[in-house]
Amino acid sequence: MEIYSFINSKDIAEHCRTIGHEFTPLEMAFIVYLSDKTLSERHRAWQWIIDTQPDMVVPERRNMNHFDSLHQFLCDYMALENRILDIFQTDESNAVYTCECLYSSFNGGADAWDTLSPTYSAVWENIKNNTKDADIVKYRIDKHWIGEGLKSIEAIFNPDGELKRIREYCVLDDEHSKELCIYGFDGFWIEVPTPFQKGDIVNNPRHNNTPIVLTDICCWPDWRAEEHLERLKKDWDTTDLTYSGYSITESGHICNSDGSHYYLDIEYFRGVLQNENRVLLALSNYIKENRDISEDLLLNAYEIILKDEYISKNYLSEYYLEAAGLKESRADISEPPKPT
């Protein structure tokens, strides 16, 4: 098994592969946990780690308990996920299922149905009847226990119906299971080499795909003192696997991204910058200082692009552009476009 293939970002995976970066068994297990693979693929990878990699202690962290054996931890964690899955798929008279579908055409939006399904098979029948020829990105199915507060299980499936993630809420009652769920992988953090530099234009295919000009990755030294960075590495958890940068809103405003998503997901933006996003190229070159982009040229470019976008959105035909003196006259444009 090649651990690099479990890194979500193809660019980070290829960079680590090229430089031959080696991971500890614990780091391998964590990369598998974060990966976008199916549950069965992750379980096979963890079993490979148990079978081929040396055992080691899982050290205590601020939000992660000490475990004497990584191998035993992985065995227990897989057994726990299988147990949750079994509970999830078992029909119960006091529980119902709901479904939410994420469509690629919704630009990150989702469609939730009001229909409650009494059984696990019934919810899939509803999915079949409601998503014919639909461009599904993923399904989220929840099992809710009626009259039992927050007790529920959430499961994420890919378009082929393969289980990717499963998580329980207020279902497990034994202390060891709670320890694995609450103080397990979510309390860990990892530093992985990346090929990115400040000013690169990147996007996150797993989070709305919006291009941003990268300004920081959590493990970059940058303004952080080295000793401060080393201390934080012992305390950070999955909520700190962040990156930040500048993006453009639909109204043309430059905003700083919230940095709430995993840096291991980002890749070089390979699309075409369109509309207001054209500003990002000038901003990227200004930050990188690899082109002669001065502050006044950056601001002028920003102003010109915004005006250009305003014109294209408010004067939709060449007739009106010519009438307003915004476009050179043409003999074949003699009347306004007819309504369709």
Image (tube, helix red, strand yellow):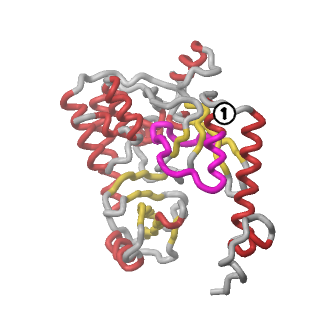
- Classify residue 103 as left or right of residue 71: right
Q: Along the line of sight, which residue is nearer the eye, 51 or 300?
A: 300
For the point 31% across and 28% down, the residue is 70
Q: What's the magenta region? A: 257-282
For the point 58% across and 30% down, the residue is 198
Residue type at numbered disc 1: Tyr
- Classify residue 142 as left or right of residue 305: left
Q: Is residue 260 above or below residue 329?
A: above
Query: Residue at label 1?
Result: 286
Q: Is residue 228 above or below residue 188?
A: above
Badge 1: how crowded within 10 Å, few (<14), some, or many (20+)?
Answer: some
Residue 227 counted in the magenta span: no
Where does the image place residue 14, in percent across and percent down from the top left? 35, 34
For the point 60% across and 39% down, the residue is 213
For the point 70% across and 59% down, the residue is 309
Residue 117 visible in this rendered orientation of the protein: yes
Q: Along the line of sight, which residue is nearer the eye, 112 or 88?
A: 112
**The quadrant where residue 285 appears:** top right
